[in-house]
Each structure stands twice: as structure tokens, then as C-alpha cells.
Amino acid sequence: MLIDDVKIKARAGRGGDGATAFCKEKMCFGPTGANGGKGGDVYFEGVADLGAFIQFRYKKEIGAKSGGRGDGKLNDGATGDDLILKVPVGTVIHNLSTGRDFEIISIGQRLLVAKGGRGGKGNFKFRSSINTSPMEHQDGLPGQDYELRLELKMIADVGFIGLPNVGKSSLLNRLTNAKSKVANYPFTTLNPNLGVYYELILADIPGLIEGSSDGKGLGIKFLRHIERTKTVFHFISAESLNPVKDYQVVRNELETYNKKLLDKPEYLFLSKADLLDKKEADKKLEELKAINKEVIAISVIDDKSIKQVEKILRKIIKQKYE
Ligand SMILES: Nc1nc2c(ncn2[C@@H]2O[C@H](COP(=O)(O)OP(=O)(O)OP(=O)(O)O)[C@@H](O)[C@H]2O)c(=O)[nH]1
Ligand SMILES: [Mg+2]
């Protein structure tokens, strides 16, 4: 099952201690204790993999590397490596220690969550005209140490919705490098999958059925995810004996869950259209035109129809920046 809410402890690296040392060579005087290196920071970075919280299933305490100690020959300690944790876009990071919340909203976005401690100064840094042989150095400071709650509130530009087995995952795989499971039975997709199409995040959402809003099938959990998608692609299989009814079943579920879902911009696709001859397909398209006159017939094996879908996606990209 998808992990979408998890508590972890994140600790940035401790700064390395400074050193107290003196030159031991002949004809050489003075302090040579070097500085400690800075501790590594902890960052979060957005990725399209909704399953990325799995890394926290058993590992609830994570930490970046400490900085190295300064040595006695003026070589500063190494900086601790940063830790970059990949989390799905739509992750809300609740910092329970400070009460502040942050959200990862785009792929590649990096957020500094816990800062590494600074390294301590070595005794070389304490030398002065009145103190040529300082005995003191500083210790490194601890890194920030926080308790975090990570909550996944999926966000996507386009959500693929429809009854089960209508070809949602197949289209996602065709358009992006996602590897959503495809099979000829209902509820193949158990959790939403994200794919990236240029600047858009596309979400393949598990099939909805009558009663989803009451928890039937995979139910309510996924209706919650549709709440945060901006546009929907609604799929109706060309195999359907009653396309208009199929459309209404899904719309009713959206409405029962939250009326606002009906206001999202929607594109209607008669999917798997290659299974029908042209005459049959046109008849079903005609029926669906009463709902949305821009409905198109698509098939993952028909390049021309995929180009039409891509044209719609380009339009959505353009609107995103208007
Ligand atoms: N002929 C044909 N078959 C298709 C097409 N798209 C998908 N299929 C087949 O239809 C079946 C269901 O496809 P999926 O992509 O798994 O459907 P889904 O809507 O994601 O299904 P759920 O995850 O169960 O909701 C698979 O056997 C696919 O190979 C298409 O354009 N043409
Ligand atoms: Mg699927």
C-alpha cells in the first residue's frame, strides 16, 4: 500500500572540531591547528515517484554526514556530505519541532530542511600579536535536529479518470516514461502513478466505480487525489455498450464526493477506438458529443490520435504560463 503519511527524525551533520597543534619542524614556530569542516545539510527534492516514501518505512531516523576534524598541519576538515532525500511532488513537510510547514510543488525543487553545524576554528585562527601560541580551539556545533511529518497530498496538472480497464495507464505509459502496470482486468492500478510530460505532471488514477465516493472499489482515497489536479482527462472505453452512462457514473461519484470536482476543465476521450470500425466509433462519438463537443477518439496504437492528445497537452502547458 502506498505510504502517504510518515514521521521521521532528520538530523544534519555535526561540524568537525578545530585542532590545537604546533609546528614540529625545525626552525618553524607557531600554531598549526586547522578548522573543522561544516556538517552536511539535509535537503528534500521533488520527484515524480509517488512511492518514494517507502524509503522511510523502516528507516525513521536519517542524518547527514558530520564534518571532519581539522588536523595539526593546517588542513581543514572535510565538509560533511549533504543528504538529499527524494520525495514525491505534493509532499508537505510539517516541521513538528518548529511548527513550520513547507511544500514540494515541482520536480527537481530542492528545499533545505536542516542545516549542518559549523566547524570549529583551529588554534591557528586564534593567533595574534599578543598570543602567538594560543592553546584554544573551538568544537564543531551540532546540526539542526528536527522531527518531521511528511504528508503526501498528490498534485498533478492532469488527472486521468474513468471506469477501470479503459486504458488510462496505457496512455500514461505511451506519453511519458512512467511504467504504470497495464492488464486486461479492472483495478490493475492500485495506487496513482505520475508521469512527466515536459512541464506537466500527469496522474493515472485508479479506476472509479459506482459507489467509489462511499468507499467501494479503491474508493474515496483517490477521489481525494483528484481534488488537487487542475485538469481531468476522462476516458470512456470504445468497448462500452453505453458510453453516456459510463460518463455519468464517474461524474456522479465526483459530485457525491465534492461538487467542486465537476468544475475542473475536462477533456473527453473515447479510448481503445481501434477496437471499433469507423462507423461504430463515429456513432459513439456522436453520443458523447452531447456531453462535450470536443470529444476525441484515441488509441495507443494510433499515432495520429496520440498527436491530438499531445496538442491538448501543449495547450495546457501554454495556459500554465499565461
Ligand atoms: N486495443 C486497445 N487496447 C488497449 C488500449 N489501451 C489500453 N488497452 C488495453 O486495455 C486493457 C486495460 O488497460 P489499462 O491501461 O490497464 O487500463 P486502466 O484504465 O489503467 O485500468 P485500471 O488500472 O484497472 O483502472 C489492457 O489490456 C490494455 O492493453 C488501446 O488503445 N487499444
Ligand atoms: Mg490502470
Image: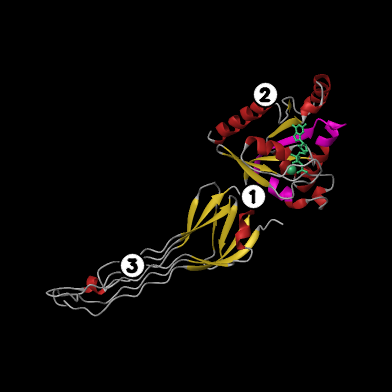
Q: Is residue 182 left or right of residue 321?
A: right
Query: Mark 1 is on which residue type?
Result: Met
- Label 3 environment density (alpha carbons within 10 Å; few <14, some 14–19, many ≥20): many
Q: In the structure shown, which secondary structural element does the residue marked by tag 1 occupy? A: loop
Q: Is residue 233 magenta?
A: yes
Q: Position of residue 56 (x, y in %)?
A: 61, 62
- Most extreme residue toward the front, as rendered? 26
Question: On screen, 291 above or below 200?
Answer: above
Position of 29 with respect to 322 (left or right) is: left
Magenta stretch: includes residue 60:
no
**Which residue bears the numbered disc 2?**
304
Discs 1/3, front: 3
Label 1 to label 2, Cα distance in Å? 31 Å
**Which is more N-terminal, label 3 or label 1?**
3
The disc, 1 or 2, on the residue closer to the chain's N-terminal end is: 1
Q: From what the image shows, is residue 60 above or below residue 309?
A: below
Give the farthest residue toward the bottom.
Answer: 135
**Which residue type carries mark 3?**
Gly
Does 261 sit above or below residue 317? Answer: below
CB at disc 1 and ligand 2 closer than 8 Å:
no
Q: Residue furthest top?
A: 279
Mark 1 Cα shell of 10 Å, populated few (<14), some (14-19), many (≥20): many
* Residue range corresponding to the magenta coloring: 222-247
Q: Which mark is residue 77?
A: 3
Q: Quadrant of ligand 1?
A: top right
Outermost residue toward the right? 241
Q: Is residue 281 left or right of residue 142?
A: right
Can I make out residue 39 in this image?
yes
> For the residue carrying disc 2, how many other residues have a C-alpha within 10 Å: few (<14), some (14-19), or many (20+)?
few
Element type at marker 3?
loop
Please provide percent x and percent y for residue 148: 56, 64
Residue 154 badge: 1
